[in-house]
Amino acid sequence: MAASPTYDVCVIGAGIVGSSTARYLSCRGKRTLLLEQFLLPHWRGSSHGQTRVSHGSYTEQLYTKMFAEAQEVWKEIEELAKEELLVKNVGMLNVEGGTSEKLKGIINSLMSSVFLSDKLKDKYPELHFSTDYTAVLEQAAGILKADKCLRALQAQFVKFGGTLQDNENVVRIHPGTPVCIETNNNVFTAQNVIVTAGPWTNKLLKPLGLQLPLKFGSAGETFSKDMCMEVDPDLRDAGNDRELVEIHVQKARSYLKDHFPQIDHHELAIIEKCIYTTTPDHDFVLDKHPSFPNIVIGAGFSGHGFKLSPVCGKILAQLAMGEKSSYDLSSFKIARFTNSGKLKASL
Ligand SMILES: Cc1cc2nc3c(=O)[nH]c(=O)nc-3n(C[C@H](O)[C@H](O)[C@H](O)COP(=O)(O)OP(=O)(O)OC[C@H]3O[C@@H](n4cnc5c(N)ncnc54)[C@H](O)[C@@H]3O)c2cc1C
C-alpha cells in the first residue's frame, strides 16, 4: 500500500465539529486531511438533518462568549457560501416547570429576553402550560440549516486546499511523530491528529488506553435528553429497540396533546433517529490525549455543539498547532473526569 504525503493535521470524522476544525486549519494554510468513514453525505452520526437551534440561552458566560463568536463565524461562512445558513431572529421560548432558577440565570446572561412568568397564557393563548411554569423568550435565537452548514464547511475546506476523503474508516491510530492513521483502505501520516468521531470516539480511543465517560443515546423526534436510549452507534438501526421507540413516540404525543393542543398529536409526521453524545456534566471535551500530546480530542457535544462548532473547531485546531486559546479551557479538560473518578485510562 503506497503511503501518502505526511499532513500537518489529520482530522478524523467529518461531522459538524470535524468539518469546522478542518476548515479552520486549511483556511490557515495547514496541510489538512479530513477522513470520514461513510460516503458523504450520511445520516448516521449527530450532525445530519435540516435544522438546529442557534441560541445563547446559557447560564455560563463561557458558552455565551463562544456563542457570540460562533455567530460571527457562521456569518463569514454564509457569505462565502453565498446562501442563507442561519435564519436569524426566529425567537425561542424556554419553558420550565417548578422553580425557575435556570431561567433566571439565562435571563441574566441574555440581552434580548423577556421574562413572561405567569403572563405566558396571555401572551401565547395557543400554548397550554399551568401557572407553575415560567418562560423566557430569546428573541435573537435563530435556526441553522444543518445539512447546508455541513456541506458549506466541507466545500470551503476543500476550496482552501484541504483533502477530504470519505469511505475511509479509521481502524487504528498508531501514536508517534508522525502519527500513523490506518484506515480500511490506506495508511496516512500526520504530525497531529484530531479525533472528532462523535459517538465512535471511545472505539477509536480504546487502543490508545483511554475511555471517556461518554454516553451515546439515540433520540427520536422528541429531543429530550432524559428520553434517550443508550445505543451502540454501529447498531443504531438494528431494529431491536422498537418497543422503546414506541414508548418515546407515545410520550411525544402526550406532550403535544397537553401543551400544544392545536397540533395534531395522533400521527407524528417524521420519526428520525440521531445520536446524542453526552458527558456527565454536559460540558464538551476539547483537550489533548493525556499520554500523546499530538493527538487532540473533541467529543461529548451533549446536544448543544452544532451552533458552537466553528469555535470548538478553532479551539481544537489551536490545541493541535500549539497556539494559546482566548478561552479558559479548564471546563473542557479530560482531567476533570479523573478528579471525579469517572475516567477509565490504562496508560
Ligand atoms: C436530535 C438532536 C438535536 C440537536 N439539536 C441541537 C440544536 O438545536 N443546537 C445545537 O447547537 N446542537 C444540537 N444538537 C447537537 C449537535 O447536533 C451535536 O453536538 C453535533 O452534531 C456533534 O457533532 P460531531 O461532529 O461531534 O459528531 P458527528 O456528527 O457524529 O460526527 C462524527 C463523524 O465521525 C465519523 N467517524 C466516526 N468514527 C470514524 C472512524 N473510525 N473513521 C472515520 N470517520 C469516523 C462519523 O461517521 C461521523 O460522520 C442536537 C443533536 C441531536 C442528536
Image: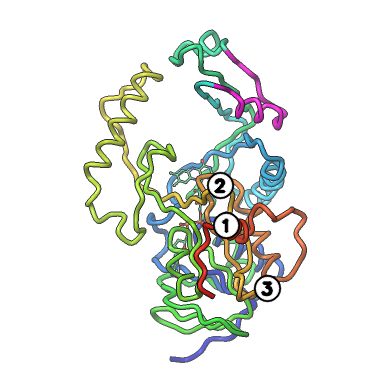
Q: Residues within 10 Å of mark 2 (few under 14, many from 20)?
A: few
Q: On the rendered image, what quadrant is the N terminus found in?
A: bottom left
- Which badge, 1 or 3, comes first in the chain's sequence? 3
Which residue appears at 74% of the width and 53% of the height? 327
Q: Which residue is mark 2?
A: 281
Q: Is 109 a magenta residue?
A: yes
123 versus 333 height, above or below: above
Q: Amino acid at mark 2?
A: Asp
Question: Which label was assigned to residue 337?
Answer: 1
Residue 77 at x, y = what percent?
A: 64, 52
Which residue appears at 77% of the width and 55% of the height? 326
94 versus 174 height, above or below: above
- Tag 3 secondary structure: loop
Residue 57 position by quadrant: top right
245 versus 2 height, above or below: above
Q: Amino acid at mark 3?
A: Lys
Depth order, front residue of 95/124 = 95
Q: CA distance from mark 1 to mark 3?
A: 32 Å
Outermost residue, top side: 122
- Which badge, 2 or 1, comes first in the chain's sequence? 2
Q: On the rendered image, what quadrant is the C terminus found in?
A: bottom right
Residue 267 position by quadrant: top left
- Tag 1 secondary structure: helix
77 versus 259 height, above or below: below
Q: Given this view, does label 2 or label 1 mark the residue nearer the observer?
A: 1
Q: How many marks?
A: 3
Q: From the Cβ of disc 2, is ligand 1 less than 8 Å away?
A: no
Q: Given this view, does label 1 or label 3 mark the residue nearer the observer?
A: 1
Q: Which residues are magenta?
A: 99-117
The reply to whether dot 2 and dot 1 touch (C-beta < 8 Å) is no
Residue 104 at x, y = what percent?
A: 65, 25
